[in-house]
Amino acid sequence: MLQIILTSLFPLIGLISFGYLLKHGQWLSEDFWRGAEKLNYYALFPVMLFLNLATAKIQMNVIQDVVLVVFSIMIVVSIALYILRHMYQISYARFGVYVQGLLRFNTYIGLAAVSSLFHQQGMTIFAVIMVLCIPLVNILSVLAFTRSHDMQLKKIILDLSKNPLILGCMVGGVFNLSGLALWAGAEQFLKQIALCSLPLGLMCVGAALKFQGFQRDVLPLSLMTFGRLFGMPLIAFLVCKIFQIDAFTTQVLVLFFALPTASASYVLTRVYGGDSQLMASIISVQTVVAAGSLILVLSWII
């Protein structure tokens, strides 16, 4: 099993490393990477999500299990974080970073890992998780940076309603429930677009890595990395056991909660005036450490 896991994850690690080398070797301009991220986020990635949900066999009991586990974990961890913020008087600039460091997830790495290890059935479960978690973690992240008198809930909801990843999942789900079938030519066309998404996305993850200023925040950086990559999957495993979730869904859920935080966390941190240097360090360290931690976690649950 370890051989299968290593074989499945090696291309992911290789593409992230390749993206890092291309960016920092200055083979490609900054404009290229901005354009690549935009293309992937607004076109390639939503098509892949649409295709997976449009052609999947979705079971209602799986959706119920995912909703139960995801909401339970998010609520418990969020409450714990707010208690710690009150106890240690953590500033909004740092609290938002900690929330994102524990609750946000790298979609590219997740989909690539699930596709490689769990195939179509796993991708369907992961897409359901994304429909739930993208709006949820975005709302929690914004709230963590925002003082109560500055809160603009209407703007948050409006921004989420225009999120291309959520729209791709929703349209794919509606198409699936409609009973319609894609024309074979259109399906092959969409598959070719979808195939471009993950390799490009993983290279963009590598290009976004920044290894500077680690010495300033060794303790919070270590806690965030250990908490996200080992603590969260352990909590997910225990919650799945408590609710008696089937083994396959448990494996996908534990993998989801073992993912490093999203590169997009850095952008949100800058927009809301958070500690962007700490956020950049957390993203980079978690992504690198995840190359080893994912192997350990997957070896444990599979």
Image (tube, grey):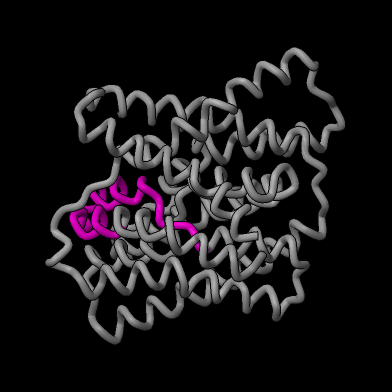
Judging depth in this view, the residue of 188 and 25 nearest the camera is 25
Judging depth in this view, the residue of 116 and 49 nearest the camera is 116
Please report the residue visible at 56 percent of the width from the left and 32 percent of the height from the top. 46
Judging depth in this view, the residue of 185 and 143 nearest the camera is 185
Residue 113, position in %: x, y? Answer: 56, 48
Please report the residue visible at 78 percent of the width from the left and 39 percent of the height from the top. 56
Q: Quadrant of residue 119?
A: top right
Q: Residue furthest right?
A: 179
Please report the residue visible at 67 percent of the width from the left and 33 percent of the height from the top. 171
- On the picture, is 182 further left or further right than 38? right
Q: Quadrant of residue 242?
A: bottom right
Q: Magenta includes 292?
A: no
Magenta stretch in the rendered image: 258-282
User: From what the image shows, is residue 204 above or below residue 129?
Assistant: above
The quarter of the picture where the C terminus appears is bottom right
User: From what the image shows, is residue 186 above or below residue 155?
Assistant: above
Residue 192, position in %: x, y? Answer: 62, 20
Q: Quadrant of residue 189?
A: top right
Q: Magenta includes 272?
A: yes
Q: Is residue 143 visible?
A: no
Residue 155, position in %: x, y? Answer: 41, 45
Q: Is residue 269 visible?
A: yes
Residue 178, position in %: x, y? Answer: 83, 32
Question: Total number of numbered labels?
Answer: 0
Q: Residue furthest bottom?
A: 87
The quarter of the picture where the N terminus appears is bottom right
Q: Residue furthest front?
A: 3
User: From what the image shows, is residue 284 above or below residue 93?
Assistant: above
Please report the residue visible at 79 percent of the width from the left and 35 percent of the height from the top. 176
